[in-house]
Image (cartoon, rainbow, N blue to C red):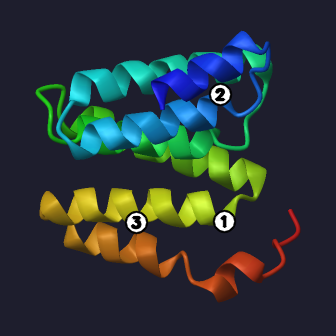
């Protein structure tokens, strides 16, 4: 994957680089290479800031939260990442990324014994609620 990404960059294209960095970070997390995963995710988020390619931004924050969850930095940093992912996905209307981020946050809260909060946030994610028109202000 690293060679493929470098070949892509050598051609002068940065399109989807944040996505590919996120995929590599997910693989690193899966094999407990958390420091490397976080480094890749930070690079991906920096690239998002540089290029404005934001379609995968919420998922990058969620992946970072997943990576940080079991570290000494702890659950507070993971929770902040999940909340950031939820906010971004809501702003973008990106329901898939929103579902994934909410599920990660609910799992974290469940593991902390915050069962009622976990249940409530999941209940607010029903497809019916997402498609209801917003109430006028």
Q: For the residues labelled 3 and 2, say whether their Cβ atoms are less than 8 Å apart.
A: no
Provide the secondary structure element on which disc 1 rests: helix
The residue tagged 1 is: 95
Residue named by callout 3: 103
Closer mark to the observer between disc 3 and disc 2: 2
Find residue 57 and report its horizontal and vertical position in percent.
62, 38
Which one is in front, 131 or 66? Answer: 66
Q: Residue 53: percent from the left, percent from the top?
A: 77, 31
Residue at (79% x, 25% y) in the render = 52
The numbered disc on residue 17 is 2
Name which residue lies at 57% across and 83% down. Answer: 126
- Badge 2 or badge 1: first in the primary sequence: 2
Q: CA distance from mark 2 to mark 1?
A: 22 Å
The residue sitting at 34% across, 42% down in the picture is 27
In the image: residue 47, left or right of residue 91: left
Looking at the image, tell me whether mark 3 or mark 2 is earlier in sequence order: 2
Which of labels 2 and 1 is toward the front?
2
Residue 137 visible somewhere in the drawing: yes
x, y percent for residue 73 = 18, 26
Badge 2 element: helix
Q: Which mark is residue 24?
A: none
Q: Camera-side residue: 137 or 116?
A: 116
């Amino acid at each position: 994957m690293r060679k493929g990404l470098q070949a892509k960059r050598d051609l002068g294209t940065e399109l989807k680089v944040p996505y590919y960095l996120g995929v590599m970070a997910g693989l690193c997390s899966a094999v407990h290479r958390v420091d490397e995963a976080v480094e890749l995710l930070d690079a991906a988020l920096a690239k998002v800031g540089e290029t404005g390619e934001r379609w995968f931004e919420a998922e990058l924050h969620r992946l970072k939260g997943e990576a940080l969850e079991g570290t000494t930095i702890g659950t507070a940093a993971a929770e902040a990442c999940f909340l950031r992912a939820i906010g971004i996905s809501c702003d973008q209307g990106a329901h898939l990324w929103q579902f994934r981020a909410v599920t990660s946050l609910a799992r974290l809260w469940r593991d902390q014994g915050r069962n009622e909060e976990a249940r409530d946030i999941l209940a607010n994610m029903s497809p019916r609620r997402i498609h209801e028109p917003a109430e006028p202000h």
